[in-house]
Amino acid sequence: MKRFLTLLLTIAFIIVMATTLGEVEAVPDNCIKPCVGPYDDSHCLADCRKREFRGGKCDKRLKPPTCCCTIAA
């Protein structure tokens, strides 16, 4: 019985890990780095301007939130 429960828990763990790994979204090319800790919209904007983009901000829809630059039109 103990062996069966261990096998069941192992299978459940593998299923949970496989579904969470599938949630990682593709980050667009104009996104440069994650917005974590003190790195916020103002730092993101400065980094984007250094790379000759028009602007940039932290896109909170991505996981983790990521600094995405605005492509000049």
Image (spheres, rainbow, N blue to C red):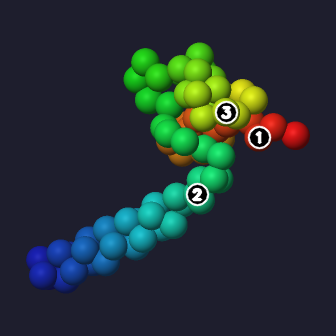
Q: Residue 45 bears which disc, if any?
A: none
Q: Which residue is mark 3?
A: 52
Q: Secondary structure at mark 2?
A: loop
Q: Amino acid at mark 1?
A: Ile
Tell us which disc is closer to us: 3 or 2.
3
Q: Residue furthest left?
A: 2
Q: Residue at x 64, y 26 (%)?
A: 49
Q: Which residue is mark 2?
A: 25
Tell us which disc is closer to us: 2 or 1.
1
In the depicted view, which residue is nearer to us: 29 or 19?
A: 29
Q: Residue furthest right?
A: 73
Q: Which residue is mark 1?
A: 71
Q: Position of residue 18 (x, y in %)?
A: 42, 70
Q: Position of residue 11 (x, y in %)?
A: 31, 77
Residue 40 in the image: above or below residue 33: above
Q: Amino acid at mark 3?
A: Glu
- N-term mark: 1 or 3: 3
Q: Position of residue 53 (x, y in %)?
A: 70, 34
Q: Secondary structure at mark 3?
A: loop
Count the numbered circles shown. 3
Q: Is residue 25 visible?
A: yes
